[in-house]
Image (cartoon, rainbow, N blue to C red):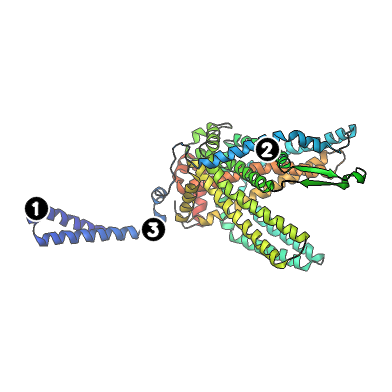
Amino acid sequence: QICHNLDTRQVSKNYLSTMSEERSNPLTARLLDEDKANEDKANEDVTEATPVDSLSPPAAIEAMRGEKQPLNWNRDWPFGVVFYIQFITIITVGGIYTDDFIKMAQRGNQPENESNDLNLMIVLLPILTAAGFAMILTQLALVVLTKMGKSFIHCSIWTNAIVSFVVGITALANGVTVLGVLFLFSALMGCCYACAVRNRIPFAAANLSAGVSSIKSNCGITLVSILFGVVLFAWIILWSISLVGVMDMKEVCDENGGGDESDCILQVQNSGWSVLWLLLLFWTQQVFKNVVHTTVAGVVGTWYFDPEGATSCCSSAIFSSLYRSLTYSFGSICFGSLLVAIIQTLDAIVRSLRNERQNGEQNVGAALLLCCLDCLLSLLQGIIEYFNKWAFIYVGVYGYPFLTAGEKVMTLFQERGWTVVINDNLVRNALSLLSLVIALLSGVTSLLVSPNNEPITFVAGFLVGLLLSSTVMSIIDSAVSTIIVCFAEAPAELEQNHSKHSRNMKEAWNKVYDISF
């Protein structure tokens, strides 16, 4: 009926337009005006009757889809400059105080003997074995996540409930009633959560499979993450040395104590530097983590939109994305990381004050205030870190400044109704469980290889396995988050470049959410 009315009005309009001699007639002019007004109203009715979600995805999100930004240095560059200055300063100061630090560390130490060298080799062999075994398990884990992602996610969401139930029963059996009731209640909530999210598991599994495929096609990104971890570890050592130097930290021993180490105390002359050094430590840790996250986002974005440039172990996408993260987008990364570092520093100060209160005089009002501040800062830190996670995806894929990237991400998910997807931690829970399993198996392996079966070898193997597996799983988590953003705004490109993953994700999505693709 609307189309018929539009056709009728168009014929009348054409007829009136041919009567040029009557255009000066007031009645004709009024009819033309009424006709135009009715036509505009009909068009508005048609537009209002068409929901946004029923439009094709490119048309529905054209206004909020990200665009590749030109390469320029005007992306929060002051924060990058300040970070490089502090980074180099810590290295310089650490190098200056290295000799004094070594002398202080060697003071009072006993000379090593041959048995110590032997013990070192006994510990080193299980650690190296655990590292190799963890790398093999990590590669097998990628296959498991690709082939059996759905089953493993099912297992991960039920594991929490089962563990809570076992701990609760154990606590009740040992007479710890309150703790047992709390864990049983947690198990009940875990069962309710598992039942509530079971219909979302297929989409999470399809998303996870796509993320793993993108990393397997660019496995060299794992080496980049490990390299950054090694550099950060070396920098932290220099940071520790520089902190001892600037605080003028010295070991003072009582001359009348007979040289016993228990008579020695550590004196600090300039304790105020500790706050600034703590901020620099948190900032550097966040920057390194977010550089890797942004680099992964850039690589996965290339795999998503231009797969020809991201199909090998050391593809050009890895180097170009890493270069952008360390140059053009580095200021944006430092900006967002600084926000989290400030909150972490404040939280560390509050916790230090809480510990002093617990060891000294008990003031109920002050203790309550510090407890509330601690909870508030922890909550704020989690919110900012979660915001950064998605904002840096836009930084890595499109090259937006930090604040613009955050606005783009929030707008995208709000307009498309994807806020519920962000809150789904199914993939992260599965990756965390897998990292824990690899770490436990690595610890057991190191314990079996150890000649004396010393418990310390299990701890060392567990930590090595956890470090290696967490490195790979964090990369996969970044890849999965990037694919969520890209799929939300450009599902057609996934269909064109990776039809199998597109089909799986669309079918799973349409079964759960009322949004058609």
As rendered, which of 475 and 148 lies closer to the eye?
475
Distance between the Cα atoms at labels 2 and 1? Answer: 84 Å
Element assignment for label 2: helix
Instruction: Kindly identify the residue that appears in the image at 45 percent across and 42 percent down.
Output: 493
In the rendered image, which quarter is residue 239 located in?
top right
User: Looking at the image, is mark 3 or mark 2 nearer the viewer?
Assistant: 2
In percent of width and height, residue 261 lies at: 88, 44
Q: Earlier in the sequence, mark 3 or mark 1?
A: 1
In terms of sequence position, does the residue under pointer 2 or pointer 1 come before the other? Answer: 1
As helix, strand or loop, the secondary structure at mark 3 comes to: loop
Badge 3: few (under 14), some or many (20 or more) residues near its Cα, within 10 Å? Answer: few
Q: Answer whether labels 3 and 1 touch (C-beta < 8 Å).
A: no
The residue that label 1 is drawn on is 20
Question: Depth check: 430 or 341 in front?
Answer: 341
Dot 2 amino acid type:
Trp
Q: Amino acid at mark 3?
A: Pro
In the rendered image, the vertical position of residue 280 relative to residue 132, given as above or below: below
> On the image, numbered disc 2 is attached to which residue?
235
Binning the other alpha carbons within 10 Å of mark 2 as few (below 14), some (14 to 19) or many (20 upward) gives: many
Of tags 2 and 1, which is closer to the observer? 2
The residue that label 3 is drawn on is 51
* Separation of marks 3 and 2 at Cα, in angstroms: 54 Å
Estimate the x, y position of residue 98 in percent, counting from the top left. 74, 34
Question: Label 1 sits on what residue type?
Answer: Ser
Residue 243 appears left or right of 17: right
Residue at point 9% right, 53% down? 20
Q: Using the rendered image of the protein, determine whether residue 295 is visible from the camera's viewpoint.
A: no
Q: Determine contact: label 2, label 1, CB under 8 Å.
A: no
> Mark 3 or mark 1, which is nearer to you?
1
The answer to whether any part of residue 490 appears in the image is: yes
